[in-house]
Amino acid sequence: MSPIQFRLAQHYDIAAIQSVRRSVSENRLSHSGSVTDTEILGYLSRRGRGWVCTQEQRVVAFVIANGSDGSIWALFVRPEFESRGIGKQLLNRACRWLFGNGVKAIRLYTDANTRAHGFYQHLGWQVSHRTASGDVSLILKHRKVPVNYGANRSMCHWSSSRL
């Protein structure tokens, strides 16, 4: 089996992105009409940036960051590719891009008490609030953390190292 690879998402990935999104069982937006191809194209071409993970040229996971509001719009991994660190690596790319563009705090929404909710909290995301619909808003703040460089300790910008 060939290794996994990561690259920027392109417009020609939209059908594969839709397929990955529909494959996830905890996704309440998994029916085919809930997210349109046009909506995804808008995020990839105008509002943000996306990355895909491929194996043997098949898209197995993706993330889309919304540069307009500094949020993670979507992160999905095919069930058979879970627990391999793929979601973490994709999220890292999206967070670095958002922080690199001056975002001070990244936000996302997910269903409360799901595996996704636990995944984000494990990576240091904090609950901001719960919505009336039962979703939870999570936030990840950009901060400086001490990094040990041998005998010297210096400050560097946090670069999603926990992700």
Image: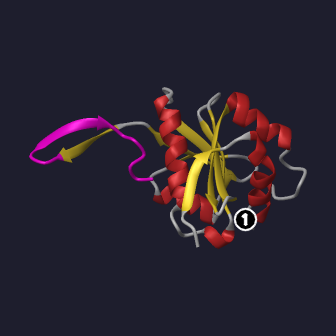
Q: Residue at x 78, y 37 (%)?
A: 41
The image position of residue 134, as x and y in percent, is: 72, 53
The image position of residue 160, as x and y in percent, is: 42, 46
* Image quarter hosting the N terminus: bottom right
- Asked if one can make out residue 86 in the rendered structure from this viewpoint, the answer is yes
Q: Nearer the viewer, residue 63 or 140?
A: 63
The image position of residue 126, as x and y in percent, is: 49, 49
Q: Quadrant of residue 31?
A: bottom right
Q: Nearer the viewer, residue 121 or 11?
A: 11
For label 1, the crowd category at 10 Å Cα-Cα, with few meaning under 14, some 14 to 19 and many 20 or more, is few
Q: Residue at x 49, y 50 (%)?
A: 125
Q: Residue at x 77, y 54 (%)?
A: 16
Residue wearing tag 1: 26
- Magenta run includes residue 58: no
Q: Which residues are magenta?
A: 149-163
Q: Residue at x 86, y 49 (%)?
A: 34
Query: In this image, 146 relative to 10: left or right?
Result: left
Q: Is residue 50 above or below residue 83?
A: above
- Asked if one can make out residue 129 in the rendered structure from this viewpoint, the answer is no
Q: Is residue 129 above or below residue 43?
A: below
